[in-house]
Every structure is written in C-alpha cells, then in structure tokens.
Image: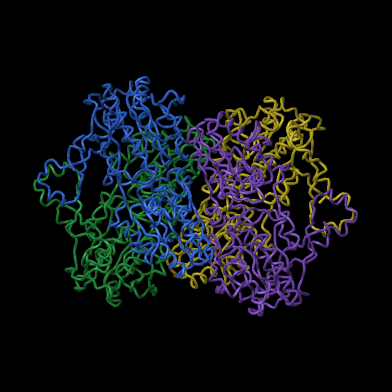
Chain colours: A blue, B purple, C yellow, D green
C-alpha cells in the first residue's frame, strides 16, 4: 500500500474556529480535537514495522473526529443528504445523526433531504426537496427504511452538479453502496471541473458488509441477526417433515458474510453456500449426495445459501437450467430448490422441502441498539470531516477506530470471505459440512 | 340446528372414580366437576329463546371439563397422539399439555407419539414410535413446530386401526385440520366396525381459523401477530421507493381471517384481498385503477392478499394467465405481482414493488403466551373428554367456553369472513379501500 | 340477576339516520345493524333455561354494535375523551379507534382530548385541551402509555360538569378502572341533576383483569405476556445460583389473574401466591418449609407473587413487620424477600435470591396485535353506543360478544380467581405446588 | 508500556502437531496458523511509531489463533471450566464454544464443568462435577445464565489446586470478572509453587465493559440493548403523568458504559449520571434545579443513573442520608428517588415518578446474535491458547483483533468512560444535559 494513496483531499485550509470545539473548550481543560497527523497505521502488526524499510512514512489512515479549525462557515453552509440503493437497517439513524450534529454542534441550519436517491437531483423527475431539522428527524430512527426514499442506478453528474449549484450546496452527504460511491466520485470530478467548493462525503451502506478496508458496515449486525430468525423457522420446518429440508436464501451478492455470521449465531445450519467457495452439485462428494447422507443420518437438514453463490454454475451447466426457465437462471435459491427436488425424485427418496426468502423482511427492520450507536458515531464523524473541508472520502471503522478513507481506494475492490480464514473454518465446524463439495 | 346433532358419542357408561376428581375432593369442599347436563346453548341470544317453540330441548353443546366418573381405567390406558398437516404455532403446547394432564392428573403412564402424521401408523414407512413422558415434553413448548413431525394426506383406515389394535391403544388424540378430522372419522368407523373400545378425540388445528362453530383456533393469534411484522416490512419498503408497492401474501386458503386481523392490528395496509370477497382487476372501479389512484395520491401502497383470494379469477381469465405459466396459475401472490407490474408498465408509470411471502416464517414460530395458555386448556379438556369415554368429537371454544363438538358437525363446513360483518367493515375502514372492486 | 338491572339508560329516542348505516346500506343488500332487542343471555347454560320459571323475560345484556337510528346529530356533536389511573397497554389504541370511528363513520369532527385524567377538567390545574383528529392519532398505537396523560384520584363532579357545559360536550368517553367508573357515575348524576343531554360511556381499563361480567379486559393479554419475560429471567437467575431463588412480584391488587396466566404460559414457576388464596408462611406445611423442600430437591425455585397476596398476613403478624419498617408493610414482594432471607439464615442454609419487580416495564409496553384488534373493536362499539344516546354504561366482552353493561352493575364488585376453578387447578398442576400452605 | 509486560507465559515448548492444523492442511494450500511473532501493536497510531526511539521492539500483544504445534497431547488432556460472579449474557455461548472446539478440533474428550464458581472445587460444598460433551452443551446458548451455576467470592487456592491435581486437570478455563481473574492468578501461583503443568486461561466477563485493554466484553452489547427497553418504558411512564419522571437505574459499578450506550441508542433520555462524572444535587446549577427546569419546559423527564454514580456523594452528605436509612445508603437509585421526591415536595411542585431497576432482567437474557458470534470466537481462541500451553492470560478483542493479554496487566486497572471522549460528548449532545452539575 502506497502511503500517499491514503491521503484525503481537502477543499482548502481550515481557518475558522469550530463552534463545536469552542463549546468543548469551555468544559474541558484539555481540548480533545483530532489533527490530520493523528493517523491509524494501515497495518498494525508488529511484523509490518519490523519489515518496513522506512518507518517514518508508513501508510496510515487519518483518524476521524472533530477538528480545531474548520473550512466552512456554519452560518453560510448548506448541506444535502441523499440515500441510494436498497434498504439497509440504520439509514434513518445516519440521517438523524448528521442533522443533529450539524444543527446542535455546528449551528448549520440549512439541511436538505434529496428524495429517491440521485433521481432527486434531476428536475424531470419532479421530486420535492425536504427541509431537515431536529424536529423532522427526531423519531425517524424508530422506523426502518429511509425517510428520504431511495432509488437504484446513476444519474447524469452534470445535471446533479447543476442542481447542487442552484441550491448553493456546500456539502453533499451520500449514503449508499459501492455503485453509489463511484457515482459520487463522478459528481466530485464534475465539481472540480467547475472549480466549485463542494465537499462530497460518503457513508458506505452495504447490507452485505463488503466494503474494502472496513471492519463492519452499519446495518450488517441487524441484518444477520434478523436472518437468524429465518434460519430458526427453517429448522423448525425441517424437523416437522419426514426428511425435512429447510432452504434459506440470504443476501450476499458477492460476499457471504451474512450467511456465515447467521450460521455461526444459530447453530442449526448444516450447509452454508457462499459466493467465495465454489461447490459441485453432482458426484460422490457433491452437495446433493452430501445432503442425502445428512438426511439418512439425521432425517432433516437446514441449508443457507447466499444469493450470489453458485452463479457461475448456473451459467455453465446448461442442461440443468434448460428445464428451469428464465426466472430460475439468476436465482440460486429457486434453482437449488428445483435441483434438490429433482434429485430426490430421481433417487426415489421422499422429502419435504420448505423455501424461505426473507430478503425484504431483513432489509426493512429498524437498526439494533448497537447499530444505532454505530450509525450515530458514523454520522458525527462524517459531519466533522465535511465541516473541515475534506472531500472524496468515506468514513468507516478500521481496527475499531473511525477513520477517513479515500473514495477511490474504498471503491477499488470488494471485501469477501477468505476461505482460509478463521471465519470460514468456524462455519465449517459449526455446520459440520465437508471442507469442499468436489 | 337439530338438538340431537350436538350430542356426543360415548363408548359406554362411566363407572370408574376419576383419580383427578378424588384429588380435588380432598381440597375443595364443593367438588367442581362438570356433568353431561352442563351445556352451552347453541344460540345464546335472547331472541332465540323467545322464538323457540319448545324451550325444554334447545340445541346445546356439552361443556368440556373433568367428569366425576371416567370410562377408562388409568392404569390400563394407553394413549396415542398424532399431528397431521402443516405447521401451526402451539402444536407442541397441546402435546405437552395432554401428556402432563394424562400423567399427573390421571396417572396414565403409557403415552405414545406417532411420527409424521398418519404415516406413522403404516408399517411400510418404518417410522418409530416415541414414548412420551413429562421429561420428554417438558421444554418442547419453547420451540415451534411439532416434536412428532407431521405429514399431509390420508392413509388407509384399516391399516391405522390394525396398528391401534397391535399397540392396544385406548385413546387416539388427533391434532389436525378438517382433512385430518375427516380422516379421524373414517378411523372411528373402522373402530366401530371391529367393535373396539377406542376413543378418537380431535384438537382442531388450522392456522386459517376456519373451523366451524369455534371462536378462534389455537395458533391463530400467534400467526396473525407474526404477519403484522411482514406488513410492517412491506410498509417500510413501500415508503422507500418511488411509487413504492409492498405486496404481502398471507395464509388463508378459503378464509381471510389472518389477512383481516393483521390489517386491523397494523394500520398501514391500504388493500386487503380475501377469498370471501371477489374483486375485479381491470376497469374504472377495478383494483388496478384504484391502486393507481392511491399511488398518485400518496406515492406508496401496501397490499395484503390471502392465498385463496381471486382463485376463480385466475381460472376464468385465460388471456391473463396464459402469459404467467404454470407456477403462477395457483399463486395469487406471484400472479398479482406480475399483473401489477404489467399494468404500470402498460400505463408507463414507474413503480418499485417488493413482494413478501412469509408463510413458513409464520407457521414455525413458538406460540404466544396467550396461545400457550389456550393450548394448555384445550389439551386438558381433550384428556378429560377422552378419559370419560367420549369419542368422535373435537374440543373447541364456543362463546368463550370450552365445549365438545361432534366431529361430523365440525367438519361439515368452513368458517369464513362474512362480508356483512363488523370485522370486514372494520377492515374497510382501516384500509380506506373501496367497498367493492367492480 | 334481575332482568331490569341489565337495562341501559338512554338520553332519549333515536330519530336521526346514522350516516354510518347509510353507507352500509349502499353496499349490503341486507343491512347489518343491531337493535336494542338483540341481547345476549346473562346465563347461557341450558340449565338456566330449564330452571327458569319464565323464559319470556330472562336477564340479558344488550348487544353492542351500530344502530340504524342515532340520538346525536353528528354535525353538532362534540366529544371528549379522558384517560384515568395507571398505564395499561392499549389505551392509545382505544383513543385512536374512537377518533377514527367518530370521524370517518359518523362525521363527528369535534373531538377533544382531556389531559391528565379528571384533573384536565379542573381549571385550577391549567391543563390544555387537545384537538383530536385522524392525523393526530394516526400513529399513537405504536407507542405504549396514553397520549393524553393520566392521573389518579377523583375530582369534584360539579366542576367537571361545569367544564362539560362550557365545552358543549355531548359525549364523554371515560377510559379507566373501577374507581374511574364510579367517578363517572357521579358525573352522570350531576349531569342528570342539571337535566343535560350528555352521554357518559366507559371503556373499562384494568391491567388486573378484574372487572365483573367481562371475559377479559384490554391490555391484559399484553400484560401477562410481558410478565412471562420476567419469570424467564427469574428462572435463569435461580438456576445460576446455589439454591437459587427467583422472586417476581407481579400486578394484581385483589385478583391474581396475571400471576396465574403468566405461570401457565411459562412453566418454570414453582409457587404462585395470589390474593384469593391465603397462605401460611411458617409451620410444617407452610410456604417457607415447602420452599426449603423444593430447594433440597431441585436446588432452585421460582416464586411469583401478586402484589395483593398475603396482605392480611402483613397486617396481623406484627412481630414480623416490626423489623421491616413502613416500606415493607404494604409491599408483599419486599416483605417476602426479607422473610425468606431471614428464614434461610435462621436454618443456616445458603441461598442466593434475586428479586424482580417489573411493574412499570409491563404497564408501559404497546399492545400486542391481538389486544390492538380488541381495543379497536371496543372503541368502535363505544362510539356506536354513544351516538345512539346510551349512557351510564361500559362496553365489554361477555361470552365472547361485545355487550353494553350498566356502569352500576359493573362497578358493584370485582372479578377474582375462583380457587375451585379449572384456572387455579391448572396453576397448581403447572407449578406442582401444594394445594394449600396451612 | 514496557514491551516485556505484554509477553505471555508458557508452560513449555510446543512440540506436538495440532490435529486441528493437520485437518486444515488437508484443505488449504497455504496453512493459516498464527505464530507467536504475529503481534498487534499496543499503540497503532502513526505518531507512536514516529516518536518511538527504537521501532525494533515496540510493545505488542500476541495475536490469538491456532498454533501449528501444541503443548498438550489431546488424548491425555483434561480440561475444567468454571464460571464465577454475576450473570452476563453469553456465558453459555462461551462454554459451548470451548467444548465444541476442544472436542471437534482437538479431540479432547475429557471436559469437566465445575459447579457454582470456585465453590465447586471445595469438597466441603459437596457440589458435583459435570461431564461436558457436545450433546450436553448443544442447546445451552438458547438460554441465558450459566449452565454451570456461579457464585461470588474467592476460595482457598490451595484447596482449588488440590482439586485440580486430584482431577488431573491440564487446563483450567475461568470465565469471570476482575475479582475472578485475580483469584485465577493466585491459583496459578500455587500451581507454579507445586511445579505443575496446568494452564490457566481467563475469558473476561463483565457486563459493565470495564476490563482494561479490551474493546468490548462479551454480553455488553446484549446488556445495553436490553437496557434500552427499560428506558423506553420509563419514557412512556414519564409522558403519561403530569410532570412525569422516569428514573432508571442501570448497571455500572465504576464505569458508566451501559448507561452511555443505552442513552445513545434510545434518544429519549434527558439526564445520564455515571460514576466517572461527579455531580452536585443542590444549587442553581445542580441536578435538581436542572431537572425542575426541564419539567417546566417539557413536562416530563427521563433519568438514567449508573449504580456506581454519586457514591462519594452518598457518603459525604450525612444530613441527607440520615433520613434514608441503611438500605438507601449504597443504592443511588433509591436515594435519588427519595431526594427527588423530597425536593419537589419542598418546592411544592406536583410530580409523578416511576422507578425502574431492570438489573436481573438484563443480566439473564440470552446473548444477541452478534454477541453469540463473539462468544464463539473468544471460546475458540481460548482453546487454541490453552492447547499451546499458554497460561496466566486472558483473551480479548483489541483494535478489533483477538489477542492474548497477560492476566496481571488486565487486572491492573479498570476501563472507564473518559469525560473528554467523544463517547461522553455524544451523550451530552443526545441528552441535552448541561456539561456539568456544579
């Protein structure tokens, strides 16, 4: 990792006294602000230090937190908040936390909620803009979803920046996944092209927990905790039927974290299939035969499959997909359901299978108390960063500390379950499933 | 209603002192048993009395409860319990309650659990039989499902009674829906043909709450309470998207009680579609246009559809079903999802729709505390009835009292939502939906 | 029971067409209103009919429900709602249901919320009055408590009726317990003295479920369901300690229903003490020795005590109460805690005891889905009754039907657990506690 | 921090191939064990590196995880598990995780559960020892508490080591708080005195989250999440009464983390009092006057007080405590309740106050899904450390990584809320309470 690639862009030097820091100074003998020199090592292992050629410039992330001086004059600052992509527990908590921090700590009174994602910037959609104040957001954390509404997909950065200019926005807060972050980078490029002083700050939202360099994303805990309930239902159904099979499809397009954590938290799962670990269906050591053996031994089985698992399989094995039709092609849950049903019919073994797809039930719940606190902290540091003129960055937890991460870096890849990690080994142990289906 | 049709069959006169009543007598000055003359009027309205020609023989159900004398000698009594059909919250509570009552109140020590429904009686399936004792059932109420397993469908009554004879069973407790009850009647006929003294007692299980003459069936409360969570999720998703639609399919093959009660308990539903109230999709006053108007007015909508709603529609409107294929034919949820999608595409109105089918999640939860108490009471009176030699009957709550209901009567029809009832009017009010889609 | 004592007072003849019934008539071929002749027998047993001397005038309650003609002209009707006494789950649901029904079904637009119980009528307190509309009450059922606030105790009926006159109130809805109902009767007397046409309708609120002639009061189910959680905690704590004792005090001033139902729903309770069943502490067959034997046998014990249990005991045994001080005198929970601690110290047996008093946690939760539906129905029929000019009555569920009950009758006594009933016998069985501590 | 003080003691060199690592090697091309050189820097800030005189020996914790070679021969290893102190969510998960890992990954079959804390080692108590196997612990994580039972206080290390010798124990796992850890160190000293080869490994249990050098202790998340419910109840009660006050006492003897996190997660708290921040009651800027002003402004208030808050106050202000008696002296909750009541009586302002003490309800719940996964991981690494012959250490999460921490170091102090930290500032913001009551 190149040390420079961890640096955060800034709109300019910070020369204004932070009203937040002034309040603090009245109370605390020692002020407790963070400086840009306060950094968290990129690699905190002792070996990294021992093997470094030059310990004077190790790569390190800026620590998040309040700065002594800020870039934007609060009385003239206008902020916009937009939420994009699918629902995830905690979005309202982040919105609420940002409004509260802007209003009470920085005295920023002009905060606007953009409706239905990036669409809200585009005049042709005709969406209104919401005025956000403590009164408006006071109770929104008690509900799931996003009070602003959301939409998927990009919009033209030129039109978006036109809108930001029209509204005289100083800070744009973007809550969204990696597609949204990439969209934010394009917005930022257009801002720079026009030489505007608009900060763009991202709060990464991914129910799959797949953002690079981030310990855990907000809402992930709530999500896998909810998933546990569906697994419990699948287990009960599996026990209820002769050779009962409970099949649960969980979220996880490219990363199987929810499936893994849910299986660890609820030890009644017998098979976990994730995108990171390919599996064979047929053959002596294939999944289907393994499932059959499990049923012969225990008369029931619970299977958790992440939605992105076995995708390549779906595309290559044409003979199987022919029968399933279009709908099944991309949906590993329905595909497995059919394949399993066909298999046991073929070998003449009676089963009862129940299929559970809790996706929207999980995405829409309010955040758990721990996620609430986490969202609040993320919101606070996002505001601190914005007021200090930082831009093109996201906030995230790294080695359990809140840090600033350049958008470019964060969107350069995707965090995935490492099949050699203790996480996956724990899953194998908890399920008792074979190391490989091959 | 003919007074005689409410009479309960009995295997013979009760001549044995109930050990349960003896224990009671030690404590209470006044014994508190129930006699067969204690009856609950079939019609408790004052008008029924005023208009009766002969008030000396009004139709009335036997009250359930402990009898002073019993028919079976506890030390020689062997009981069997079987659970049939789909899962429903509370089955384990009923099993547990019967085992506890048989064991502790009547000193019946031989209680057998038949596995996987009526299959468990048929030798060719090779299922084992479980010994049930307080230790075995102690904690089962903490889990959903049925500890005995279940299966759907009938089995040969001859083989079943062969098995009952082989096992020297005196009482068969059947927990199941109306199909199961009809099966129990056939078993009972075979028992009579062989002149055996075996009591057959049913505890009606229907998550749809559709058993005739019964206030409410066990598990129903838990079921609609769980359904409320799915509706809440659908509401959150609907609010999150531009013209957001949350579509929830709930249980209710022929009776829409779950849909109605869930909608009343969670006032964010805008449309409830149930089997009892036909609806038109197309046209000025059709459902689709009404949905469109709702979206134009409020930008989101929540729809709850019972699985049995619109079934005739599905069959008659061939032109629509052609496109949907086999899978969609019987599934009103997926059918509506497609029809709604097509409609808004046709009129060029952008929507976002989320479909939730929580069926197995609801069926598999443990019973709520109130359902637990209800299951316990049902189990107790089922045991009382059985020990008194009653047969061909089910237990149920009628005008809030536990009564004995002849199986024949209970399986003669199906309770359904009355479109003229206050229940349906309350739903109309709570949703604000038009009185009819025509 | 005298048939006349069940009659409901009326302010005058109903001559106005109900707008609600008119809407109905448009939809339903058969109108579905209720007449005052539709009555529910006071005693629905067959024996009651057989033993009646005259079956032409059996005592019977008026059925609740919409009337064809109403007394009050909706456009001129002004309603007031007041909530009194301690919190109980569901109050907000009742308020909400009444406002919705008045507004949408009857077009009554002037609805006022009186704040902090009867205090709200008294000018010297200076409380404001709230305007209640669908918008105001839309979401209140998602929260526990009462949006109007509450207070305990009576206020001067003269001042209250002065206020009703000043506000030109036609209907006063009173949500409260038996003290509140008695207060309402006094208000009604003052109304009559002044010859005013004001209807006073009560919706009985008692978390203890102790109102006469009523199957179950709203909020009771939610309350005992919550209590189950505390019992579960007590059980866990009891298991965790050497000779662990979990002691839970539950609500129930004069009636032990919550304690009984919670113990039945959560079968880990070993002793239930309720006001209706006296108990001795000391002696061979006393509670303390029984507790000791339980600990010797199983090493842990869970005790549930209703707050009104053993009150006479507290007063008579002066020697024990001397040491405990004032606070302990009336509090059976803290008293038992001390007595048990002293006893085991005396006999030199090491125990660990944990005391749980969940009172306010239980009272303040939102209503369960079933209680929500129940509250809605109660609210609707209260409105129907009021608009028909009924007065001095409460609404309640009787033999599972909603009926009108004269206030005088309902407040003439208190429903209590019958020690000879199946309910108490079930509790004895579930706990395994001795029939008596004597 | 001295680098050497972070070193972990070892019973001897590891020469046995780990069966766990062998299984791994079959699957993974690259083995994924951890070596003792894999260390996590004590201070991961970049400044720490820049200011270090010698970067070749920076203080660092050993990373936890499986080692390639182990010290104990699995077939001859006998392990004991003991749980001490108060209940905390997750104890059963830790027990279960250790048994599973020992059994399945290391083939250690002799695992013993010591009952009721350190008492279980002392013959005079006569407690039995439990055999722990996967079958025994399979479902224990579904319940709160500890299946082994617990007790408070120390026992004679000589007797304990006598017992360990008699049982031929190789590894003692101790789950407990800092008192328990100090007890474990004494046991370890006695072990060394006798020159035995017994590893002593601690899994720190503290519901207060107050163990030094540890991000977060297991059960803490579950605990503050449960506390949120009590706060919600207090809020509802406060809203229900005229000048309503909801007063909640939460755990936190010396550290107010639960109070802070619960208040952040549930934004209806107006005052948080913790042990780390002294407060004055009387005076213009005192707590009582501030409470009064809050009531005048908003008519209700919610107060959260950690049990260790204001302890010094209780002792110094003799005049106030005289009236309260012994019970009140140490109990800040009851003390505040009385002081507040007295104050408003004195200034003649009517209030209604509800006091909630949810302690045992919180301590006894099962762990949340996230805490479950955390407990499992802690258990796994505790087993890895033990099998590698490590001793006198605890496992914990540090900078989000699992590490080995010397017992001596961990028990040298206590983690507390820093009044200058962002955590406390967030609490001040969320509550709106003054920075100081002085």
Q: State which quarter of the image contains the C terminus of chain B.
A: top right
Against C378, is D158 above or below?
below
Q: Position of residue A6 (x, y in %)?
A: 21, 38
Quadrant in the picture for residue C9: top right
- D16 vs D389, nearest the viewer: D16
Q: Where is residue B25 in the image (x, y as percent from the top left)?
A: 71, 71
Q: Is residue A134 visible?
A: yes
- A107 vs D268, nearest the viewer: A107
**Residue occupying image coordinates x 49% and y 43%:** D234
- D269 vs B408, nearest the viewer: B408
Quadrant in the picture for residue D192: bottom left
Q: How many marks?
A: 0
Q: Where is residue D179 in the image (x, y as percent from the top left)?
A: 30, 59
Left or right, D105 with respect to B314, comes to left
Q: Can residue C314 be seen in this view?
A: no
**Residue occupying image coordinates x 61% and y 30%:** C132
Q: Position of residue A350 (x, y in %)?
A: 53, 66
Against A403, is B405 above or below?
below
Residue furthest top as drawn? A166
- C245 vs B399, nearest the viewer: B399
Q: State which quarter of the image contains the N terminus of chain B.
A: bottom right
**Residue occupying image coordinates x 52% and y 30%:** B348
Against C167, is A40 above or below?
below
């Amino acid at each position: 990792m190149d040390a420079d690639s961890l640096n955060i862009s800034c709109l300019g030097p910070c020369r204004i006294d932070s009203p937040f820091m002034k309040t603090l100074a009245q109370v605390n003998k020692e002020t407790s602000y963070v400086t840009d020199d306060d950094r968290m090592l990129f690699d905190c292992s002792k070996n990294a230090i021992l093997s470094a050629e030059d310990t004077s410039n190790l790569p390190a992330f800026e620590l998040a937190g309040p700065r002594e001086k800020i870039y934007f004059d609060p009385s003239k600052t206008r902020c916009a908040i937009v939420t994009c992509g699918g629902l995830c527990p905690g979005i309202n908590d982040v919105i609420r936390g940002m409004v509260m921090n802007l209003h009470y700590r920085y005295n920023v009174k002009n905060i606007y909620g953009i409706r239905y994602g990036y669409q809200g910037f585009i005049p042709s959609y005709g969406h209104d803009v919401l005025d956000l104040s403590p009164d408006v957001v006071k109770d929104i954390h008690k509900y799931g979803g996003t009070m602003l509404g959301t939409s998927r997909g990009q919009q033209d950065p030129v039109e978006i920046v036109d809108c930001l200019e029209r509204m005289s926005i100083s800070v744009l807060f973007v809550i969204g996944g990696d597609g949204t972050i990439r969209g934010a980078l394009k917005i930022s490029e257009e801002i720079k092209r026009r030489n505007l002083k608009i900060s763009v700050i991202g709060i990464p939202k991914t129910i799959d927990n797949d953002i690079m360099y981030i310990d855990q994303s907000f809402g992930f805990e709530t999500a896998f905790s909810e998933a546990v309930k569906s697994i419990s239902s699948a287990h009960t159904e599996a026990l209820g039927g002769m050779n009962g099979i409970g099949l649960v499809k969980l979220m996880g397009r490219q990363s199987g974290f929810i499936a893994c954590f849910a299986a660890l938290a609820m030890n009644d799962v017998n098979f976990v299939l994730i995108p990171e670990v390919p599996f064979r269906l047929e053959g002596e050591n294939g999944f289907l035969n393994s499932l059959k053996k499990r049923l012969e031994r225990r008369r029931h089985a619970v299977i958790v499959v992440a939605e992105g698992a076995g995708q390549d399989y779906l595309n290559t094995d044409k003979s199987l997909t022919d029968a399933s039709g279009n709908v099944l092609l991309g949906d590993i849950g329905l595909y497995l359901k059919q394949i399993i049903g066909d298999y046991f019919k073929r070998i003449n073994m009676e089963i009862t299978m129940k299929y559970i797809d809790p996706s929207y039930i999980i995405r829409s719940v309010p955040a758990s108390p721990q996620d609430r606190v986490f969202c609040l902290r993320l919101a606070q540091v996002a505001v601190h960063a914005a007021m200090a003129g930082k831009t093109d960055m996201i906030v995230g937890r790294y080695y359990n500390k809140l840090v600033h991460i350049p958008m470019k870096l964060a969107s350069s890849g995707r965090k995935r379950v490492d099949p050699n990690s203790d996480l996956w080994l724990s899953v194998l142990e908890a399920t008792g499933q074979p190391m490989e289906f091959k």
